[in-house]
Structure formats: structure tokens, C-alpha cells
Amino acid sequence: MSDEVGAPRGAGVRQLLLTLGDELVEPLVVPRDAEVLDVVILDPDDEPGVQPGDLALLIGARGRAAVPLVRLAARHGAVAVAVKVDERDTAAEALQDVAREAGVALLGVRPGVRWEQLEALLRAVVSSARVAASAGEGQVLGDLFGLAQTIAELTGGIVSIEDPAYRVLAYSRSDDAVDELRRLSILGREGPESYLSMLRGWGVYQRLRSGEDVVHLDERADLGIRRRLAVGIHAGSQYLGTIWVQHAGREFSPGAEQALVGAARVAALHLIRQRNESSAEVRLRANLLRGLLDGRVDPATVGEQVGANLRRPSTVVIFAARGAERELRLTELTSLISVHAAAYRRAALVASSSGRVYVLLPELPESGARETVLALTGEIVTAARRRGQVQAAIGAVSLGPQQIAESRRVAERVLAAAVRHPEVEVATLEDMRSEVLYSELIDVMAEHPGIRDPRLNALAAHDGEHGSRFTESLRAYLDAFGDVAGAAAAMHIHPNTLRYRVRRAVELTGIDLADPRQRLVTTVQLQLSEDPPAGSRPD
């Protein structure tokens, strides 16, 4: 029996990536979201059995040996090719070039993945997509905004749906006057803290979390808040959120409470499905950003996957939590940043790594990009204050996809400098240029031992052999710009002791501190023993 005309017969490449997750494969090149009809094995020693619409698994070939097989699969109509790629493999770029030229998707398979496992999973996804398409799955539940509108019609009120963090997920349209609570909740994407505190104090959230009973809240004219009905959304013992129904100036419908209980059960299906899909989507987008910043994933692939034009200006911003328990707050901070970044651009990418949150803000305006990024970053830091101290560093504005990695490098440098200034919440290169340039000089000297002054190495060796402190004293003296009293106080020694040590350091090395060039080089080299180069700092 032939398939219905126009009906999908397989799974899109993007769906495969979302379902499998980045633990198994990563998108190296995805020129378009083509439909995969079947999964086939392409072995170098066998005749190619590839048909149009196939995803070809290149078993037995990797690196440059896989290049001709990618071309072969494309000639036979494959829409995607999967090949095992080692992160240290220098042939990855050649494979990406061939895939782009041939117009096929290139999926990088993790080294530890077994081919038979991957084949079985891919076939299951393609088969499930075919069954779901024929059954019309996805049209039954609609979306959360549509559900909110339906609840409004059934109850005669004005509806909003929140998650457990009080963030508004969806709301109904209304021509009726809304109260201040609803207005603030929708505009701020979460309820105002003053009212949330009252609800917690009244035990409302405890009742919503404990069961399916509908909770009644009386009008509070003094607060500008109308009557409300509320019901918790549950999946077993798990609390997923709340449905709120504001009084619209007329009585609630007779069956409003019963309708709310049923609506909560339908909403649970929505949220479970969205949570599963969102989790996969978040992992994919985070992996795309990490790959882009590390240079492992082709920028064109990232732009295609997230719908962004990376040829337009973009920038990288890094956020770091400060203080105790910052690792515990990383997930919450990542979620908050994701909401704000997505509000600015749907194609914004967010990824957390090593206690930091990296954000790529694409498609910045041609003029005023710096002001735009400063304003958005400031809003995020302000919103994050309730969850602890946060510091942000803004990278350079990139004018093309190849400059994005450089934007990340600048942001890393700025953040490393800003850490020494905890009072600075949002740091830019303009703010930290002197410290960043100083760090660059230290790194250059660290990476090129041949340009260092051997006399200072000899002085350090002398200190180690005799237990003297000439190197440390010389560094303190130079850091204090020759202020003997200030440097001596910092070292807790007498000024005459410092003068003697500096004089002996000059005698032992022959360095002329009256020469500004020698003084500068000496200061930078001595700093190496105090500040490790950026390359050795944790990323």
C-alpha cells in the first residue's frame, strides 16, 4: 500500500539528534533538516546498498579513509552519513568540507558507541516517527496556550499556567480587565515576590502540592488582586506546576472546579511531553554551542540548527556565580539565563561548563550592538541577584562565524581580570583592557621561556639555595612603584630591610632599575611566579 501523498515516512535528522542526545552523536554538518527514510550500513569492502533518503553508517572507516565513502553515499542519494570521529582527529575538517560540498548531513559518532546499538536506536526512532505520523500523534494535545484558552472558556475566568518556579508558561487571551498580579506575572514572566511570599505564608502552595483539590483565594482589594481558583498539576507524586483562574467580573461557570481538575490532568501530559522534548533540545543546543566555541562543530551547522544568521554580528557572554554553593546554583542560574537569552533571540545558545554559563547572542544590530548586549547582560545579572552574586564578562563583537571563538577567548580574559574586582558585576574589555593586556604579556612570556631574563632565574635559584627573599622583595618594591614604606609594610618588614634586599638583588643580577624597559620586563617576569598564565588556569 502506498503512503498518503505528502505524509512523512520517516524521521527528520533533527529529530534523530534530539532523541539520541549528544552522548551518542553530535551534529558536525547539517545543511537542512532532511527526512531519513531508512538506516543502512556502508562497509568499505561491500557493494553500496544506499538508497535515496537513507542514513548511512560508515562502519570500518574513519578519518580521511571515510572521505570517499561520504561522497559515495551522497551520490547514491543518502541524506545523512554517520562516521566515528575522535576529537583529536585532524581529518574532521576534511570530512565536514566534503559533507557540505555534497549537501549531506554529517553526524559524528562517539568513539565508545557500538554500531549495532546505534543502528537499533536509529531504526527505532525512524519507525516510531512513521507510526506517529500515520496515527496523527501531536495533534491530540495541542499546545499549552491553546489549553489555557480552553480552560478559560470552561471556567469563565482568565487563565495562566505556571511551573513550580512560579514562571508563567502560558495564559489565555482576555478582553476583560486583569488585576495587578496577573499583569506583573505575565510581564515579568513570574509572579511578584511580595505576593508569592504571602501565598507561601498562607499555605497555598503547600495545599497545591499536596493533592488535586481546587484552592479558593479571596479577593484582596487592598492589593489590587481579584478572586482566584487554583489547582496543582501532578504526575504521580511529582508537582509540575499550577493552573490559576482569575475572576473576570462574572461568576465562574457552574462546573469550573470539575473542569479545573480535568484540565490539570491534561496539562500534566503537556508538561511531561514538553519536559522530555525540552531536555533533549537543551542538550542538543548546549552541545552545539560547546562544539562551536571549541571549533569542533561547523558554524554553518550551528546556524542551520538554531535558525540563526551567524554572518551577522554576535558575541559571547560568560556568567560566573560567586560565593559559597555556586555549583549548587549553576542549574538554577543556567535556567534563568536561558529564559532571558531566549526572550532576546530565539536562536540564542546557552551552555554550562566548569561552573560557568556561556551564552552566544546572535544577530545583534549592526549599530549599537555593544549597548544592546550591555543592557541585556545587566538585566540578567539584576534578576540573578535574588539567587546569589553573579559576575558577567562580555566578549568582543564578532562580525562573522569565524570570529566567535575569538569572542569567547576575549570574554574568558575579561572574566579572569574581573574576578579580582568583585564590585564589578558586568565587565567588558573596555573596563579591563589594562589588566587583560597585562595578562597577555604574562602569557607570552610563559609560553616563550627563551625571551625571559636568565638573571632573574638565577636570583630565584639563589633564594632557593640560601633561603633569602630577594626575588619576593624586588617584586614587592616594583609593584609599589618604588614606594619603600608601602612595600615594606605589605611584607611586614622594616623599610631598611627592604632597601637592603633590593640593593642586593640589583648587585646579584646587574639589572638597571633606572631603565624603564628593564623595569617593565622585570616586573612582568616576576609576576609569573605569582599569577599562573591563562593557559594553566582552570577553564
Image (spheres, helix red, strand yellow):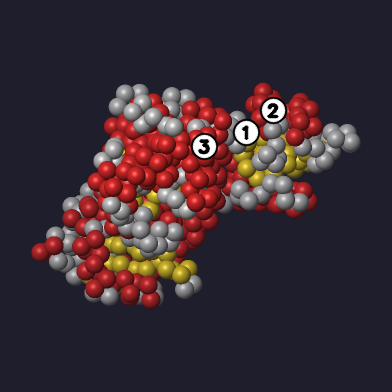
- Can residue 306 be seen here? The reply is no
Q: Mark 2 Cα within 10 Å, few/some/many (few <14, many 20+)?
A: few
Residue 86 drawn at (x, y percent): 70, 41
In the image: residue 77, left or right of residue 129: right
Q: Along the polypeptide, which appears first: circle 2 or circle 1?
A: 1
In the image: residue 374, left or right of residue 352: left
Residue 91, quarter of picture = top right
Establish if 3 lies above or below 219. Answer: above
Real-space Cα distance between discs 2 and 1?
12 Å
Residue 205 drawn at (x, y percent): 31, 71
Residue 530 disc label: none
Residue 516, quarter of picture = top left
For badge 3, the amino acid type reads: Ala
Q: Along the polypeptide, which appears first: circle 1 or circle 3?
A: 1
Q: Which dot, 1 or 3, sits closer to the camera? A: 3
* Residue tagged 1: 29
For badge 2, the amino acid type reads: Ala
Residue 446 disc label: 3
- Quick one: 361 or 250, which is closer to the camera? 361
Q: Along the polypeptide, which appears first: circle 3 or circle 2?
A: 2
Residue at 29% x, 38% y is: 482
Residue 468 drawn at (x, y percent): 44, 50
- Quick one: 110 or 489, which is closer to the camera? 489
* Residue tagged 2: 94
Q: Mark 1 Cα within 10 Å, few/some/many (few <14, many 20+)?
A: many
Element at badge 1?
A: strand
Real-space Cα distance between discs 1 and 3?
37 Å
Residue at 17% x, 62% y is: 225
Residue at 44% x, 32% y is: 510
